[in-house]
């Protein structure tokens, strides 16, 4: 139950880091670059409908994000996010800290798939992330999560499909809209909301310990060239001023 949304949560953070470091590029170029990076990191098919990065304000907008499952897990949609809106702290980002002022996340679909060996797509994703982290070495770029002031969540359909035990298959439309969580400093702050979903909607697979405990860092989120993008942005005519 505690780990179900961890990778979605971290994926959103990675998206923020990847995109804001390319803030001076045109949106279509940034979108193609982000899709390529996520595909490389996850090994999964990814599609972004539209991506916009604010030039005068530190904002990020993503429409119709879809991460697919690999053929080993049926090839269906893994994560579907119709809308993601973020306002971030640029000054913190320059210090390799991810501090998000506001986040609106519409989780349209989350499909957990378990293969015949009992491994889930979430576990497979975690294993690949560990491999990428170890292969990159200690010189990879690292950003530390520094919290979200206000997180607003809309939750749609949750689905679990098991090739090992079809009796465990379930699908539920949650239908939560604009659920607000403030001062999110770790994934633990989302546990009450996840517990509500499990109890109110009777989503049994949320009680599974699908993932082991991870870290609070976002590793290898961007190549070293991203540092130059930060430097260029700091010299722009409309820098973010701390309040």
Image (cartoon, rainbow, N blue to C red):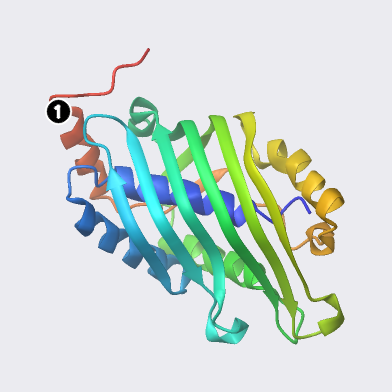
Give how far across and how far down residue 67 sits, in percent: 48, 67
Give how far across and how far down residue 100 sits, in percent: 47, 32
Please tell me which residue is depicted at 22% across the width and 52% down the height of the picture: 27
Please tell me which residue is depicted at 28% across the width and 29% down the height of the picture: 57
Disc 1 crowd rating (10 Å Cα; few below 14, some 14-19, many 20+) is few
Give how far across and how far down residue 220 sits, in percent: 41, 54
Quarter of the image with the N terminus in it: bottom right
Against 5, is 53 above or below? above
All told, the count of numbered labels is 1
Query: Residue 68 or 175: which is nearer the viewer?
Result: 175
Q: Is residue 140 visible?
A: no
In the image, taking residue 172 as reference, residue 87 lies left or right, namely left
Specify the quadrant of the image occupied by residue 108: bottom right
Say which element carries label 1. Answer: loop
Against 139, is 216 above or below? above
Specify the quadrant of the image occupied by residue 96: top left
Please tell me which residue is depicted at 40% across the width and 63% down the height of the picture: 38
Quarter of the image with the C terminus in it: top left
Give how far across and how far down residue 51 sits, in percent: 31, 52
Against 144, is 200 above or below? below
In the image, taking residue 124 as reference, residue 41 lies left or right, namely left
Query: Residue 200 or 33: which is nearer the viewer?
Result: 200
Specify the quadrant of the image occupied by residue 211: bottom right
Query: Residue 232 or 19: which is nearer the viewer?
Result: 19
Residue at label 1? 235
Query: Residue 37 or 157: which is nearer the viewer?
Result: 157
Q: Is residue 214 visible?
A: yes
In the image, taking residue 108 as reference, residue 2 lies left or right, namely right
Q: Residue furthest top?
A: 243
Please tell me which residue is depicted at 13% across the width and 24% down the height of the picture: 237
């Amino acid at each position: 139950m505690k780990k179900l949304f961890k990778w979605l949560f971290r994926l959103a953070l990675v998206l923020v880091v990847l995109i804001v470091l390319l803030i001076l590029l045109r949106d279509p170029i940034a979108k193609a670059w982000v899709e390529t990076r996520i595909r490389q990191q996850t090994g999964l098919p990814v599609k972004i409908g539209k991506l916009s990065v604010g030039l005068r304000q530190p904002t990020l907008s993503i429409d119709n994000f879809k991460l697919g499952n690999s053929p080993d897990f049926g090839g269906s949609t893994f994560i579907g996010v119709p809308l993601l809106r973020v306002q971030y702290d640029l000054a913190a980002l320059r210090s390799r800290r991810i501090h998000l002022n506001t986040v609106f996340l519409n989780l349209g679909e989350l499909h957990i798939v378990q293969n015949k060996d009992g491994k889930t797509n979430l576990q497979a994703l975690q294993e690949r992330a560990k491999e990428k982290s170890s292969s990159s070495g200690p010189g990879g770029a690292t950003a530390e999560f520094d919290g979200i002031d206000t997180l607003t969540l809309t939750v749609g359909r949750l689905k679990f499909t098991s090739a090992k035990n079809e009796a465990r298959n379930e699908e539920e439309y949650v239908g939560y809209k604009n659920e607000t969580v403030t001062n999110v400093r770790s994934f633990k702050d989302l546990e009450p909301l996840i517990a509500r979903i499990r109890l109110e909607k009777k989503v049994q697979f949320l009680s599974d310990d699908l993932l082991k405990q991870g870290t609070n860092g976002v590793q290898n989120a961007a190549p070293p060239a991203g540092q130059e993008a930060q430097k260029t942005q700091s010299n722009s005519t409309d820098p973010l001023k701390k309040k």
